[in-house]
Image (spheres, rainbow, N blue to C red):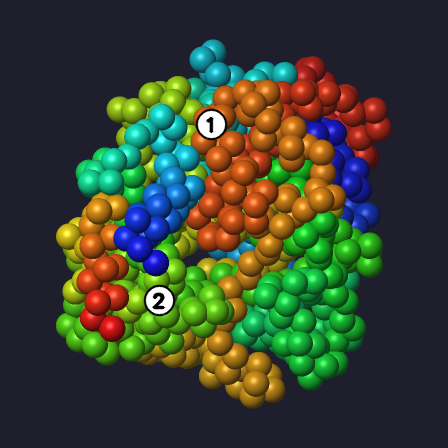
Amino acid sequence: MSAIDVRGELRSFIEDNFLYLRPGTELADGDDFLARGILDSLGFVELVEEVQTRYEITVADDEITEENFGSIDAIVGFVARKRAET
Amino acid sequence: MARAVRHRGPDGFGLALERGAGFVSTRLAIVDLPRGWQPLRSGCHQRGAPPPFATRSHQRGAPPPFATPQGGGLLVYNGEVYNHPELRADLRRRGEKFESESDTEVVLRLLERDGLAALHRLNGQFALAWWHAEARRLVLVRDRFGVRPLYYALSDDGTLVFGSEAKALFASGEVSASPDLQGLDDIFTLWGARPPRTPFRGVSQLPPGGLLVWEQGKLTAERAWWSADAGGGAPRGDLGELLRDSVALRLRADVPVGAYLSGGLDSSVITALAREEAGHRLRTFSVAFSDPLFDERAHQEVVARALGTDHHTVQITPGDIAAAFPEVIRHAESPLVRTAPVPLFLLAQEVRRHSITVVITGEGADELFWGYDLFKEVTIRELHDREPERALGLLDQLYPYLGAGGARRGPAWRRFLLETGGRDDPLRSHLTRVQATATVKAFYHPDVVAELDGKASSVDRLRSELPESFGRWSPLQRAAWLEVKTLLGPYLLAAQGDRVAMAHGVEGRFPFLDHRVYEHAGALAPERKLDGMRDKIALREVAATLLPAEAAARPKQPYRAPEVAPFFSPDSPEWVRDLLSPAGLSEAGIWDERRVAGLVRRAQAGRVEGIRESMALVGILSTGLWHRAFMGQDAGGYSPETAEPRVRIDNTSEAAGKELA
């Protein structure tokens, strides 16, 4: 699966699960979820769980950072790095 | 008004007309069947009317507050005082004579002799109104835990209207129904409106353990007469004996008493004690689910067999929940975020079919003995602050019923559970629930958001009302107090307790909520309640002497019911689609149409799986039903009572005191 596919899947997951609660909100790939109010702390939990399950990667405690999960771009990069490790 | 709450007292009603006041009481006959009718008026020496029962002053010096040894009082009350035989015997020793065997007469006499100090001697569940015509004074009192409801509304001209349910107030014609957004915000934060607030603007509920005094057209006092604050000192008495006595007291009735058996530890202990104390074959009742995820039938049957009860089970399907939901909301008089009250509504219906009008249950034990997972979370959080590795290990063992341990749900979930709220946040134990529930509020209509903006939030109001000593309590004591104040009273004993049982004229009785048992538990050393992950230790020791080992050791399974399936299956009722449509949503105006449409699409696609969205769905649907029932198309229509009262007291003329029975 390419980075483009990951990006598309993530976008549709976020639109489907979170953006419907914020009608009219446009989200760019680099936008910060927390700063834009797209996700609350529980939404963040759901997002991380989704990434773990969908891409079959193990996320360590210290990897739960905004750097890895803060935006669509960040997650795409994180998933690519984790896959490269295996 | 009587007609509006007839379900609470289907056996008849009585009324009293006083100058400037009127009282009506519907009766569920449990004690002294031929004579226990209300309202009950005591004799009035000053008027020279023949006293049905004389009261005498027994004290020198200043009388206790509101003591009226000259009599003349009138009492209406819902509930039971279980220790009335002992109180009656004591009053007889003090020279009182009684006309009936009813607890009502004992309560009135005791109040007249000892004033409000008498309340502390009452062991029971009650909402009472005590009127003194001479002083033009009304005292409203609610029992310690708020088992019995009591609503009131005070208008600008000083008129006070009160009743067991808000619908009685609306039926009076003196009070109209409209939403109270802060009351709703309580529900979508903590699952129930916190007294004195209700979801209705201008309608209050007396807090558990509270009283109110209205004199000469003015509210002159509103205060607590009992407090659930964390106990101190050494526990008094032996837990097993206290529980046995509490059960024995709660079996006192002139009608057969049944028991609810959930399959868990608490109701099993109560049922075992009841079987021994009752001396006859006890009838037990259980909820079972067609969905094995929620079903506890196997455990219920183990206990029922071991105790030899005459056991009955009601199996609940998702369709049953959808069908009964509107009626449950009408009785609960509140939007809900869970469907769990519905099976208990259907269970009470079954109980009534067996001609049982009183049931004892295990309610309250999880609050007293720290049985909920919420308390284990507190322990794990505290441990995590010191030994993170061990805490993570324990967390993985929690929530096995979710189908995935903490580890499988992953580090983000762990961190949410462990790190929500700061270490010193007084509400730390409850913030995960608050946050999960708050998802419902993401669906608010912008107008609602705007109206709530600038008003104190539900959480802020709770923070500002914590007792002064709260900061000195341990995290577990704080959690227990919050659980009693925010969940037990406002939700479990209300929508999931009194309302769904009384909908069918069934009275629930709760031996764990005997104040002696509560105070005993409050004084127990913490490790006698929760030691690491071992819960309810003192209670399990009692259970071990009464139950099969399997039942005494069984871990808690939270009681839950299907939330989404009832409303999103091919044969779901028409009102679901109707209420979720733009037109349906605009009736209450609480929810934003576009956001809800997104949720509905997800539900239709079978993708609403988590607790957060299911709470939102149930919250939105129940708000629509609640609005329709009280403010919309189904509102009003409170027909006048046409039956004859069993008691009529007319005290409006000079020839006061005419009494017909």
Quarter of the image holding residue B329?
Answer: top right
At a point 58% along the width and 75% down the height, the residue shown is B269
Q: Residue at x 49, y 76 (%)?
A: B555
Q: In the structure shown, which secondary structural element does the residue marked by tag 1 occupy?
A: helix
**How many residues crowd mark 2 within 10 Å: few (<14), some (14–19), many (20+)?**
few
Real-space Cα distance between discs 2 and 1?
34 Å
Badge 2 and badge 1 both on one subunit = no
Residue at the image point whose x is 20% and y is 54% from the top: A77
The image quarter in which residue B524 lies = bottom left
> Looking at the picture, how far across and down is residue B301, in whole percent?
70, 77
Figure quadrant of residue A64: bottom left
In the rendering, at what x and y percent does residue A67 appear? 15, 52
Cβ–Cβ under 8 Å for marks 2 and 1: no
> Can you tell which mark lies on residue B594?
1
On screen, residue B445 versus residue B279, left or right, reads left
Name the residue type under label 1. Answer: Arg
At 79% from the left and 38% from the top, the residue drawn is B12
Q: Nearer the viewer, mark 2 or mark 1?
A: 2
Q: Residues within 10 Å of mark 1 (few under 14, many from 20)?
A: some
Q: Quadrant of the N terminus of chain B?
A: top right
Eyeballing the image, is B214 above or below B107? Answer: above
Give the numbered dot on residue B437.
Answer: none
> In this picture, is B467 found above or below B158?
below
- Which secondary structure lies at badge 2? loop
Residue B609 coordinates in the image, percent (x, y):
50, 53
Q: Chain of mark 1?
A: B
Q: Which mark is residue A56?
A: 2
B649 and B388: which one is in front?
B388
Q: Residue furthest top?
A: B157
